[in-house]
Amino acid sequence: MNRRTETPRARPRRHPAPRKKIAFSPAHHVPAYSRLLFDTLRNPLVVYMIIVGNLILLSCCTIFYFFEHPVNPHVANFFDALWWGMSTVTTVGYGDIAPVTWEGRVISMALMVTGIVFFVGWTALVMSFLFRRASEEIVESEALSIAEYESVVIALGQISDQIEKLSARLRRLEAAAGRDGPAARTLKTAPRKSR
């Protein structure tokens, strides 16, 4: 038959095999960590740091603009002052816009210090919240694995008891049959365990 004239057959659908549970996979935990990040950003101290840091940045950029705009040819509009502020506060400092007045230099120094305090401090604060929350979740997940570990130890103890009972029964059977097998030899030499 010609392939072009054949009607396509429906292929049987394969269901994916169930996945094994992985202890940690970033792709698996993305929704949990995005929730964790959202909860961290809602923390009042983090919100305070964001608001105060941005207010300081905008205030310094505005003051810088008013002092530098009339005398600095590189500060043509407020966006140039905002560009200067962002590069200063993030400690990138491209050098394309530099203050020429002493007022602008004082504002630059103040923004450098507050940039380190608020923006670097904000990053450290957010990371400490994230690590604390993540470590709590890891401890909770480890508690489940400890319970699983205890159940395995109990099961191994039961299996060990069963092996001991079967070994004793085998020794008795070999002794009753008159065989001098390894089980009968250990029966004669091994002390009996009382329960």
Image (spheres, rainbow, N blue to C red):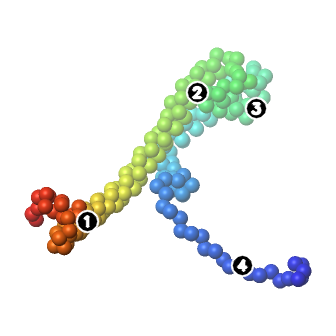
> Earlier along the polypeptide chain: callout 1 or callout 4?
4
Q: Quadrant of residue 195?
A: bottom left
Query: Residue under circle 3?
Result: 77
Indicate the secondary structure of the residue bearing disc 1: helix
- For mark 3, does the 10 Å Cα neighbourhood hold few (<14), some (14 to 19), or many (20 or more) residues? few
Q: In this view, does 158 lie above or below 127?
A: below
> How far apart are the two marked residues, 1 and 4, measured between alpha carbons?
50 Å
> Do the CB atoms of the residues marked 1 and 2 lie less than 8 Å apart?
no
Amino acid of disc 4 = Arg
Q: What element carries label 4?
A: loop
Which is more N-terminal, label 3 or label 4? Answer: 4
Which is in the foreground here, disc 4 or disc 3? 4
Q: How crowded is mark 4: few (under 14 residues within 10 Å), some or many (20 or more)?
A: few
Nearer to me, 9 or 164: 164
Q: Which of labels 3 and 1 is toward the front?
A: 1
Chain-order first, disc 4 or disc 2:
4
| Mark sitting on residue 163 | 1
